């Protein structure tokens, strides 16, 4: 029996909690960088489920691994051992240089774990007063209460106050970070490239300030790599491009290639402070999720995926910069690798809607930013097709720019 978009919308309106403003399209299948809706129409996907489907849709190797595991054993709980947590954790350690991983189900859960482990570290040291956090204006780390505490946007925060104690600093002012970090700070948390905040890379000067402040006070640094990590920028993790020295890393989105799996990566000194019972997850690290993660990580380690992202990412940047020269509504091109943002002088919504109508999926963040997150294995020809479509969109949409 066929289903229509109107059928889906009507049923959702009756039974699904209305926390999302969905776009008027329903997808039923995909292949690589392409999606197909209920009417069979094809779209070029430069959203990737907000950076989740790192190997594209229906990747043959990933699909085979998931299918095999689903037919063998999906879940037993963390009461028992199984082969794939250690396999995925070892590959994460190789990529990140942090030796241990705690597996959970999402990026926001990974942030929650990092915040807890930071607090636990200082408690173990016999220092109970180091409980506050320093975060960054424009940063987004999730919507659970701990992660929300270090997310800057007041729109998200206000209805759920009071939250954990956090101080937010302007990423354009490294001196503000140096002043904010004290002997009361448990950890600094910052994205090497802000995702929801508008694809805003951390400056080298701010990265140096993070290193200096943490070294001076002993404060831990949490690198929130939920969106920028796992090859998205051509590095295993983008903190490596900035010379940052994290004690903890939050990982999610791309880790399972579409399956919900996240991880908190932990240095040895922090790991020594964590004991059985300090944290846990019923689903976290199950066989299905960690087998998918192990497959994705293997592509980064030996599949040539990082080199591919660097090459096609440079091509994407060239095309976007050429596009910006043609259209005065584009005031800046930001990002790295396959994590790119077009800062507009006007609201980005008309661009997003028109692009979708023409068969290209991009999304809007920070109101005036067009965000592009193609799958990591996107081909140069697909990038060319996507930017050609985007060029036609900019040419067709009247955007009034105040001069």
Image: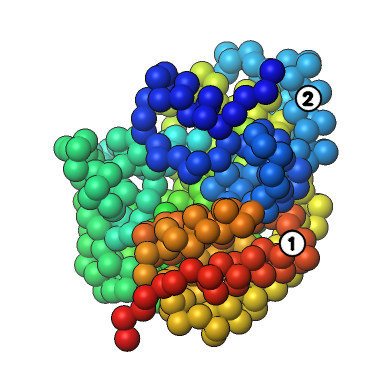
How many marks on residues? 2
Q: Gap between marks 2 and 1, in whole Å?
A: 28 Å
Q: Residue at x 22, y 62 (%)?
A: 180
Q: Are marks 2 and 1 in contact (CB under 8 Å)?
A: no
Dividing the image into 4 quarters, which one contains the C terminus?
Answer: bottom left
Q: Quick check: can you spot residue 368? A: yes
> In the rendered view, would you say 175 is above or below 196?
below
Please tell me whether mark 2 or mark 1 is closer to you in this view.
Answer: 1
Q: Residue at x 67, y 37 (%)?
A: 39
Q: Is residue 86 left or right of residue 361?
A: right
Q: Report the disc number at residue 18.
A: none
Foreground residue, 213 or 372?
372
Q: Which residue is mark 1?
A: 382
Q: Which residue is mark 2?
A: 67
Q: How is the image coloured?
A: rainbow
Q: Is residue 118 left or right of residue 397?
A: left
Foreground residue, 222 or 271?
222
Image spot of residue 263 (x, y percent):
54, 38
Foreground residue, 390 or 298?
390
SS for dot 1: helix
Mark earlier in primary sequence (2, 1): 2
Q: Quick check: can you spot residue 240? A: no
> In the rendered view, would you say 57 is above or below 342?
above
Count neighbours of disc 1 (C-alpha within 10 A) and say few if under 14, some if 14 to 19, many if 20 or more: some
Image spot of residue 231 (x, y percent):
65, 56
């Amino acid at each position: 029996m066929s289903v229509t978009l109107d059928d889906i919308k009507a049923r959702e309106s009756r039974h699904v909690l209305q926390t999302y403003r969905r776009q008027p399209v329903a997808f039923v299948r995909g292949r690589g960088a392409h999606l197909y809706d209920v009417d069979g129409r094809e779209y070029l996907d430069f959203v990737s489920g907000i950076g989740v489907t790192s190997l594209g849709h229906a990747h043959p190797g990933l699909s085979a691994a998931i299918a095999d595991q689903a037919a063998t054993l999906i879940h037993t709980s963390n009461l028992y051992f199984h082969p794939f947590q250690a396999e995925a954790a070892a590959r994460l350690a190789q990529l990140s240089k942090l030796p241990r991983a705690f597996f959970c189900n999402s990026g926001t859960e990974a942030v929650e774990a990092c915040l807890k482990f930071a607090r636990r570290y200082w408690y173990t040291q016999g220092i109970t007063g180091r409980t506050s956090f320093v975060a960054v204006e424009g940063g987004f780390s999730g919507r659970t209460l701990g992660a929300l505490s270090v997310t800057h946007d007041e729109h998200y925060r206000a209805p759920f106050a009071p939250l954990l104690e956090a101080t937010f600093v302007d990423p354009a002012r490294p001196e503000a970070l140096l002043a904010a970090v004290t002997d009361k700070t448990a950890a600094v948390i910052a994205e090497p490239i802000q995702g929801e905040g508008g694809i805003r890379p951390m400056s080298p000067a701010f990265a140096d300030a993070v290193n200096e402040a943490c070294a001076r006070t002993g404060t831990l640094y949490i690198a929130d790599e939920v969106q920028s990590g796992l090859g998205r920028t051509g590095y295993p993790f983008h903190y490596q491009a900035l010379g940052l020295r994290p004690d903890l890393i939050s990982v999610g989105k791309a880790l399972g290639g579409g399956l919900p799996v996240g991880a908190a990566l932990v240095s040895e000194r922090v790991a020594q402070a964590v004991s059985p019972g300090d944290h846990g997850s019923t689903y976290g690290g199950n066989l299905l999720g960690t087998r998918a993660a192990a497959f994705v990580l293997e592509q980064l380690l030996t599949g040539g995926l990082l080199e591919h992202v660097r090459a096609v990412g440079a091509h994407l940047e060239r095309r976007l910069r050429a596009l910006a020269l043609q259209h005065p509504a584009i005031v800046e091109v930001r990002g790295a690798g396959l994590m790119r943002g077009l800062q507009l002088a006007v609201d980005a919504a008309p661009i997003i809607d028109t692009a979708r109508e023409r068969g290209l999926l991009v999304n809007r963040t920070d109101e005036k930013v067009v965000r592009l997150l193609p799958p990591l294995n996107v081909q140069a020809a697909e990038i060319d097709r996507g930017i050609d479509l985007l060029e036609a969109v900019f040419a067709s949409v009247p955007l009034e720019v105040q001069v």
